[in-house]
Amino acid sequence: MTSRRRWQRPPRVTILMKQLFILLAVIGCCGLAGWTVYQQTKSTPVDISVAEDDADEITLLNPKTGEVTRVEWTPTPAIDPKTGERTLVQGLYCEKCDKWYPAPPREMAERLPGGPVCYYDQTRLTANGPQSSAPVSSSPATGG
């Protein structure tokens, strides 16, 4: 009885398929790396120390009392005229939550790629918002 040999692909075809697979994997990795670099570079850091419209003013927030005031620009933490203590920090407003949040320290804010975002709904915080006694959150702003 003669034994039948199973048909196998010629080695040349197998080698070409392996090379094609490796080539496609390298192209895919390069594309993924390029997309990641593009996403990181298109979101530029936001300077939160100056409001967009009013470069001479800053919104200060007292995290203890929730009082929001708009004054001439001053370094933070600023002195609260009522208590004489350095408790006033820059306030950033979330339009979706309708709340004011304390701004992160400048060193931390510079490391946030898209600028500070709301801790709860991940929307971008702005330096402009209502000046009345709006709701205030004690949670710090974070990056997204």
Image (tube, rainbow, N blue to C red):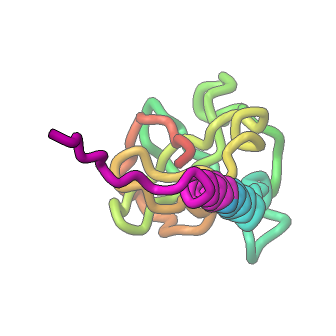
Instruction: Identify whether 138 is placed above or below 58.
Output: above
Query: Which residue is at 70% across, 34% downward?
Result: 108
Query: Which residue is at 68% across, 58% downward?
Result: 23
Query: Which residue is at 59% across, 26% downward?
Result: 83
Magenta range is 1-26
Q: Is residue 23 visible?
A: yes
Assess whether residue 19 is covered by the magenta stretch.
Answer: yes
Considering depth in this image, is 41 or 84 the residue closer to the camera? Answer: 41
Assess whether residue 83 is covered by the magenta stretch.
Answer: no
User: Where residue 127 appears, x then y in whole percent?
Assistant: 63, 61
Query: Which residue is at 59% across, 63% downward?
Result: 126
Which residue sits furthest bottom?
A: 53
User: Where residue 130 appears, x then y in whole percent?
Assistant: 48, 69
Magenta-highlighted stretch: main secondary structure?
A: helix
Q: Is residue 71 visible?
A: no
Which residue sits furthest front?
A: 1
User: Where residue 38 appears, x then y in whole percent?
Assistant: 73, 64
Considering depth in this image, is 38 or 66 the residue closer to the camera? Answer: 38
Instruction: Identify whether 35 is placed above or below 77.
Output: below
User: Where residue 139 appears, x then y in whole percent?
Assistant: 42, 35
Considering depth in this image, is 3 or 106 the residue closer to the camera? Answer: 3
